[in-house]
């Protein structure tokens, strides 16, 4: 005795699906009284009562079909239907149900959708069963159910009829006969598509609440004599007192709707009743239905063998069909009544399939397919091809044949027009499952995709989504295809308004309000780091300074390398703000308002880059009605475009939200510089690192007197990692500030000379000059000494002049100590009128005091000869007159030493060719007056 | 000439370096994007097939409704793929088209100023490709 030919394919998804879907149908006919007794139990209908017990996992029934060798069936299933359900479901009802499946799935997946989508690598690492949405199966099943009870296939045709009459009914025997004779029988039976003589089983239902079963037992005896002793049975229910049962641990729970479960459930069934029902169903299948089918298979097989098998019959059949070829082509093909040999072969095949004798089924389907093909009965042909493919699959034989059959069935269904589209879909689903069972995911994806072409949006969308998963699971994963199919699916979902897969709303939750108009982007300008005062310097000043140093316009050369993209980026650059890799920090601030107490955590700026920037998280608590300003920072790390799209937040660690910034509503406040086009203020071109120069002047005096010479040290520091080359410096007021030399740094000023400005360049650069974009605010210049000089020719000597110098101290509090008067240049020598007498009456000049001194100015004898040779190289070797007489030992200052000489040179350049300068020195400053 | 034909050259790392709609049909905005999607998705198939054959012309490897993707894989180290999305069935023409475009592409590669894998911006190349499309497709 062989086991039934249940092979490895039975364990696959398709195998399970077929063993669920292609099983004998039992039609349940009942009287209202019987239904009433049953509905006492939490409103269960008879069908619902019986359904949990129509699946048998551990039976052991020997089956012998065509061959002499019996095999055993261990698992079996019956499908129970009321006669009203035995017809093709309405198209619209199906649509609604499909929609319901998808929206249920959308709701169930809502929490998942709210969280971040998993990384692709995680999805790939997880097994298929975990990542593939389970509602696909539900959806596919609904789609397949939409095709039940077609007349071109026999496996949905009822195999048996269960007639149930209550013992309360009047004249139960007549009721049994009436039940089967009413017009309510499905069209399949009435219109001759199937044999109306089907197996009937008579069940008398007794409600124990209505009294003892004695009356029922009598009735049963009567039934047995009328309908035959084997086909009658008594079922007693409601033996127990009413108990409120729990749905959870109850066999009916999976078979009733959720709304029914929510009602109060009172059960009158005790353990005996339940086991009675179980026995009933098991006996029905093992003792009646299976033997009945077995017998029918044997009879039909004999008939078919007699009429169709063998060489003679084949020739005869061919001849007969040739004669029919003249019949006009009807789109639906010829109709076959149950008595036609074709229908009988089909029944034989389907019965054999349901009894898992796939070889017998296959041989009959094969026989039938040639007949249908010759008859041009395309729908029937496709149906048979489909079953052939499934038989091949269940036999685990020839993959190629199985696929060819499915493909031919699929194409044939499509060929017959709109009536076959759903069939094609079902066929495609089975085909795809078949391919998946053999790990041919790529091909399965292709099949799903082919299904979509004929389906309306919603099924098509689901099919595309399934296709995308197929590509994901194929080895190696075809991620591009996966993405493409998902996009297509999304498109279809969108088309049928099932867009909850993409968007969802959170009801009744007060979200923080972001004050968009106050969102500002402040970014550190790449051109200055100075204080705001420095920032207020007008652009024109900078421009005038830059004029000679920066090439005015970049000449654009165009050749073949110049591409379109370049010009577009240039355009973008013009309208976007520019920031620098690594060092710039952008901070975005905005107000958030809320009415309830909420905690916002982990606020971050969302951007279109990957991890090419660092984002700052801000955590804060927002009280009811409070509004706060949040500052967030972005530091870009690589070159490219940076777009700030919006903010994301997590409320109380659970609710994630985001807000996109609409740039049109925002103002730009990028430090101080030019205001960019508002639409692009959140777009930044990130350019590569720039050096960042910082300049300081240490010990900037806060006041100074006119003519005061000071040394200022400008320190430039390059804070970036990029080296600075070719620094140039330009001074806006060259009269007041002049560059010194390196030696000036080393001069010990108080002892050596007066102070002087010494900008110092510390960089390793070619020293063309120095340029800094910093501006310094110089101290107020106060009036100090007023020096006026009057020169008159000396009455006695031709070469000499008398010089009268008036010095007035204009300061309010300072006293000056006059030190020395020097003339610059070779041409003139200055000396006191009388060498032995002090020039000045008082050396100390108090505030407001004025003094007059007299000098003698004499043209140098050396002048004409040395003019050409020395004047340029050493112009400052002049003569000095000591003004102080008290400190005669103190050395005179050497005005030809470098800082003073440079200064004088500068003054000469700016003021013209003055030849005599008179310097007055004091301890703290230097005053000059120039003589011509 | 084919009513729809989208030609694309894909370089290393799947970066397109040249793209041209060479069909005679009027261009629709969404169609262009669809073409890009289809061609991109077809790269998965190219990846599979390219190593199974020594031929450079892979014929029609993928389809989307009535649009077919034909691919020509060059033997260049940087693995350049010429891809054509078309609705015509003229395989010989497509093969000749690919071969001649390949030749043009080699000339581009020979240009010392061209960085392999960068975008082909030569207008001369573009004109030539379009002329070839008119001739063969």
Image (cartoon, coloured by chain):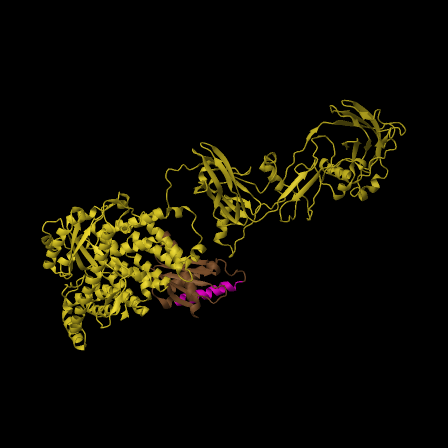
The hue in which chain B appears in the rendered picture of the protein: brown
What quarter of the picture does the N terminus of chain A occupy? bottom left
Among the chains, which one is yellow? Answer: A
Helix, strand or loop: magenta stretch: helix
Quadrant of the rendered structure where residue A126 is? Answer: bottom left
Specify the segment rendered in magenta. B95-111
Judging depth in this view, the residue of A512 and A272 nearest the camera is A272
Residue at coordinates 52% horizontally, 56% vertically from top-left? Answer: A559
In the displayed structure, A359 sits above or below A470; it is below
Of B2 and A821, the residue lying toward us: B2
The quadrant of the picture occupied by the C terminus of chain A is: top right
Based on the picture, tell me whether residue B45 belongs to the magenta stretch. Answer: no
Nearest the camera: A780 or A83?
A83
Residue A422, position in %: x, y?
25, 57
- Quarter of the rendering containing residue A69: bottom left
| Residue B110 belongs to the span the image colors magenta | yes
Residue A45, x across and y down, in percent: 21, 49
Can you say whether A353 is above or below A834 in the image? below
Q: Is residue A254 left or right of residue A515?
A: left
Q: Is residue A148 left or right of residue A703?
A: left
Left or right: where does residue A644 sit relative to residue A449? right
Residue lying at the far bottom of the rendered structure = A311
Residue B73, compared with residue A858, is above or below; it is: below
Q: Position of residue B18 (x, y in %)?
A: 45, 58
Relative horizontal placement of residue A379, taking residue B71 as reference (left or right): left
In the rendered image, residue A842, in percent from the top left (x then y), is placed at 83, 24
Q: Is residue A345 visible?
A: no
Which quadrant of the figure has residue A327?
bottom left
């Amino acid at each position: 005795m062989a086991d039934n030919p249940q092979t490895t394919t039975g364990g696959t998804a398709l195998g399970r699906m077929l063993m669920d879907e292609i099983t004998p149908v039992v039609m349940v006919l009942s009287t209202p009284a019987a239904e009433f007794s049953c509905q006492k139990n939490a409103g269960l209908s008879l069908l619902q009562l019986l359904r949990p017990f129509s699946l048998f996992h551990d039976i052991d029934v020997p089956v012998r079909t065509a061959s002499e060798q019996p095999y055993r069936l261990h698992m079996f299933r019956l499908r129970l239907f009321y006669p009203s359900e035995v017809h093709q479901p309405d198209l619209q009802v199906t649509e609604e149900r499909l929609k319901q499946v998808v929206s249920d799935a959308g709701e169930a997946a809502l929490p998942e959708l709210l969280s971040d989508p998993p990384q692709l690598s995680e999805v790939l690492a997880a097994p298929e069963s975990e990542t593939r949405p389970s509602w696909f199966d539900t959806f596919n099943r609904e789609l397949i159910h939409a095709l039940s009870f077609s007349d071109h296939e026999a496996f949905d045709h009822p195999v048996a009829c269960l007639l149930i009459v209550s013992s309360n009914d009047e004249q139960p025997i007549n009721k049994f006969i009436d039940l089967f004779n009413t017009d309510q029988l499905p069209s399949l039976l009435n219109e001759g598509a199937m044999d109306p003589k089907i197996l009937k089983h008579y069940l008398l239902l007794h409600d124990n609440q209505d009294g003892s079963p004695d009356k029922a037992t009598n009735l049963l005896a009567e039934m047995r004599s009328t309908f035959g002793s084997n086909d009658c049975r008594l079922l007693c229910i409601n033996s127990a007192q009413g108990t409120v049962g729990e749905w959870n641990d109850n066999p009916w729970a999976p078979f009733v709707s959720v709304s029914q479960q929510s009602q109060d459930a009172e059960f009158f069934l005790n353990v005996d009743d339940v086991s009675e029902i179980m026995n009933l169903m098991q006996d029905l299948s093992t003792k009646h239905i299976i033997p009945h089918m077995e017998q029918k298979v044997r009879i039909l097989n004999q008939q078919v063998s007699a009429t169709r098998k063998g060489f003679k019959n084949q020739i005869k059949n061919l001849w007969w069909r040739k004669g029919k070829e003249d019949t006009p082509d009807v789109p639906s093909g010829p109709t076959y009544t149950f008595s036609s040999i074709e229908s009988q072969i089909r029944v034989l095949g389907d019965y054999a399939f349901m009894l898992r004798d796939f070889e017998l089924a296959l041989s009959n389907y094969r026989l039938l397919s040639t007949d249908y093909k010759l008859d041009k009965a395309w729908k029937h042909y496709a149906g048979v091809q489909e079953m052939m493919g499934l038989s091949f699959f269940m036999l685990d034989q020839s993959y190629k044949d199985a696929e060819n059959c499915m493909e031919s069935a699929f194409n044939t269904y499509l060929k017959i027009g709109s009536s076959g589209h759903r069939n094609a879909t079902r066929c495609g689903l089975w085909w795809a499952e078949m391919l998946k069972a053999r790990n041919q995911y790529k091909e399965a994806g292709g099949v799903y995709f082919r299904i979509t072409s004929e389906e309306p949006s919603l099924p098509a969308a689901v099919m595309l989504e399934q296709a995308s998963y197929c590509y994901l699971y194929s080895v190696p994963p075809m991620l591009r295809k996966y993405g493409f199919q998902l996009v297509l699916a999304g498109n279809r979902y969108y088309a049928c308004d099932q867009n909850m897969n993409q968007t969802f709303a959170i009801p009744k939750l007060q979200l923080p309000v972001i004050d968009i108009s106050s969102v500002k982007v402040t970014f550190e300008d790449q051109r200055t780091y100075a204080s705001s005062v420095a920032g207020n310097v007008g652009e024109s000043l900078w421009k005038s300074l830059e004029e000679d140093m920066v090439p005015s316009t970049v000449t654009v050369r165009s050749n073949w390398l110049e591409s379109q993209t370049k010009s577009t980026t240039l355009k973008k650059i013009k309208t976007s703000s520019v920031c620098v890799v690594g060092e710039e920090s952008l901070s975005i601030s905005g107000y958030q308002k809320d009415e309830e107490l909420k905690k916002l955590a982990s606020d971050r700026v969302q951007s279109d880059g990957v991890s090419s920037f660092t984002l700052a998280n801000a955590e804060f608590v927002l009280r009811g009605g409070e509004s706060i300003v949040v500052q967030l920072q972005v530091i870009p790390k690589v070159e490219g475009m940076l777009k700030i799209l919006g903010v994301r937040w997590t409320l109380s660690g659970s609710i994630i939200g985001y807000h996109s910034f609409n740039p049109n509503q925002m103002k730009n406040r990028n430090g101080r510089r030019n205001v960019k086009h508002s639409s692009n203020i959140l777009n930044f071109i990130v350019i590569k690192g720039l050096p960042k120069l910082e300049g300081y002047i240490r010990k900037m005096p806060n006041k100074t007197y006119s003519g005061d010479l000071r040394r200022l040290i400008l320190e430039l520091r390059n804070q970036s990692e990029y080296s600075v080359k070719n620094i140039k410096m330009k001074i806006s007021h060259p009269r007041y500030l002049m560059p010194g030399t390196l030696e000036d740094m080393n001069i010990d000023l108080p002892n050596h000379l007066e102070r002087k400005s010494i900008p110092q360049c510390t960089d390793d650069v070619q020293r063309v000059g120095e340029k800094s974009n910093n501006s310094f605010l110089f101290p107020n210049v106060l009036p100090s000494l007023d020096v006026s000089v009057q020169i008159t020719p000396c009455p006695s000597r031709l070469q000499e002049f008398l010089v009268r110098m008036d010095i007035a101290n204009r300061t309010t509090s300072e006293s000056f100590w006059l030190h020395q008067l020097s003339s610059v240049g070779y041409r003139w020598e200055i000396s006191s009128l009388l060498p032995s007498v002090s020039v000045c009456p008082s050396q100390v000049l108090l505030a407001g005091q004025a003094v007059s001194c007299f000098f003698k100015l004499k043209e140098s004898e050396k002048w004409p000869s040395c003019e050409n040779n020395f004047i340029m190289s050493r112009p400052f070797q002049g003569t000095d007159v000591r003004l102080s007489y008290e400190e005669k030992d103190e050395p005179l200052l050497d005005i030809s030493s470098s800082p003073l000489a440079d200064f004088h040179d500068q003054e000469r350049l700016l003021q013209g060719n003055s030849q005599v300068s008179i310097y007055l020195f004091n301890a703290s400053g230097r005053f000059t007056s120039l003589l011509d | 000439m084919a009513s729809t034909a989208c030609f694309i050259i894909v370089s290393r790392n799947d970066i397109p370096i040249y793209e041209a709609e060479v069909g005679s049909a009027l261009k629709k905005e969404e169609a262009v994007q669809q073409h890009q999607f289809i061609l991109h998705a077809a790269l998965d198939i190219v990846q599979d097939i390219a190593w199974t054959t020594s031929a450079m012309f892979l014929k029609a490897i993928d389809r989307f409704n009535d649009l077919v993707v034909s691919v020509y894989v060059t033997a260049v180290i940087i693995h350049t793929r010429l891809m054509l999305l078309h609705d015509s069935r003229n395989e010989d023409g497509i093969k000749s088209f690919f071969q001649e475009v390949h030749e043009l592409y080699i000339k581009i590669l020979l240009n010392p100023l061209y960085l392999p894998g960068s975008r082909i911006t030569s207008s001369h190349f573009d004109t030539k490709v379009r002329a070839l499309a008119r001739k063969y497709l």
